[in-house]
Amino acid sequence: MVLQKKDRMKNLAMKTLKLTLSLSLGLMFFGTVNAQKYGATPEDSLECIKNLSVYSGFYKHKSYKDAVASWKKACEICPKSSKNLYLRGAGMYKTFMNENKANPERVEQLFDTLMWIYDRRIEHFGQEGYVLGRKGSDMLNLGGDDDVEPAYETLLKSFELQGSRTEPGVLVTLYMAQYKMYKDDKVKKEDLLELYPKLMDVVDANRSSKKPKTAELYLNAEENLAKMFAPVADCPDLIQLFEPKFNDDSENLKLNKNIIKLMDAKNCEDSDLYIKVAVKLNEQEPTANSAFSIGKWYLKKAEYTNAIQYFVQAAELGGDDVKLKEDAYYRAAASALGARDYPKVRELCRKLLQVNPNNGEAYILIGDAYSGASKTCGENECEKRAGYWAAYDQYLKAKSVDPSLAEKVGTKLGAVKAQFPKQADCFFYGIQDGAAYQVGCWIGESTTVRVNE
């Protein structure tokens, strides 16, 4: 084993010598400006190349302890020679820290060097925002209690510089650092509440990345952020914090978006503040989704007229989203049924059927509207029940376009059949069972006379 190691070292030394000689010749033709990144003088360049080669050889064999002396020399002589100096250096020193867990004093020294590596990388290769994210993450995860605040400040600066390009891991670590600061009474709950939607904006900007792995990482970050946010505040906290702000500055688009995002995260949709902000936000930036959410809120509160308005808006803004448009028109029609605005039910269902002609639920709603309005149409006992015949026809249509509704339709058919007029009631007015019939008033449907014996 000793001989094998000596042979490897000998081979490595020979390779280093050959590489040094070839690169030295190359430097003669490389040009003064480019050569300077390998050292200030030709002698420094030779020394730089030698140390780069030696440390790289050891590094590739994971002999980090053997590599570190040449690595340090290269950092001293030619700090601009390669970004890999700092990438590999950080990796080596994190390994050293892990190997020295039992020696806190040594770990602290190694940690300081790791931080120095990040600073030198920024100094010589830029990418300040990106590198600060890596530095802050290591500072929080590998440092001690005294490093929490500097880690938070470092991560916050990274976030401010990177914006929507902030790495998913940095988003999570930043919020973790701020939460620790909150537990130590160094930041307020309000700070945690205000940072969360900003971090979620970055997740939203990257959740649909064309790179599946990138999208997955941001979605994982979203889950982790949500877990950390859960214990921070409840709905009363959010209302107490944001209601005065909204009342003072209701036209503030950014504030309104943050309030909705936070209240969505805590399922606070039932609050009066939520709907006030949602309506204002929908005025500022109307979207199908925001209108749909408002419609659901009003429907839940049985405020049918408002619900219809927002569901229709959602459908009209739905664009190519057939599923959303179909759902919005259906809920609008259901709201109209709740308001007993029967002509409106049919109007909205017909719009729904333009989106999807095979939506059986639309025919059921029309049938319900005819059934509900039947006794308001006609002059006598027979005519006032003609709406039930029209409803019966609509239920049959529902079953024909969507057989899965058979059980539901069967119940509806039984209910309206029980409302058919008696034969005697119709015979008196010359209306015969099985004859064609035009239903009166707004229903205006052609149907078939059906009577109960």
Image: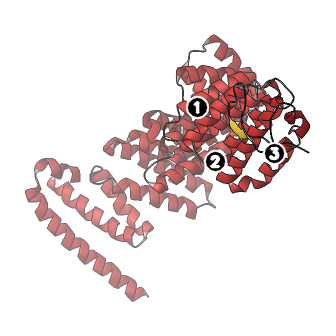
Q: Is residue 314 above or below residue 41?
A: above
- Residue at 57% of width from left, 33% of height from top? 315
Its colouring scheme is secondary structure
Label at residue 314: 1
Q: Which mark is residue 412?
A: 3
Residue 342: image location, x then y, percent: 73, 28
For this rendering, which residue is in front, 259 or 25? 259
Vertical comparison of 217 with 429: above or below: below
Closer to the camera in the image, 205 or 108: 205
Where is residue 179 drawn, in percent x and y? 66, 38
Is residue 422 visible to the viewer in this orientation of the structure?
no
Where residue 138 sits in the image (x, y, percent)?
A: 53, 49
Q: Indicate which disc residue 224 carries.
A: 2
Callout 3 amino acid: Lys
Please tell me whether residue 68 is drawn above or below residue 198 in the rendered image: below
Residue located at (47% from left, 33% from top)? 160
Q: Does 436 sit left or right of 291 as displayed?
A: right
Which comes before the other along the chain, label 3 or label 2?
2
- Frontmost of labels 1 and 2 is 1
Element type at mark 3 = helix
Give the amino acid at mark 2: Asn
Give the CA separation, mark 3 to mark 1.
29 Å
Q: Residue furthest top?
A: 248
To which quarter of the image does residue 345 belong?
top right
Image quadrant in which the N terminus is located: bottom left
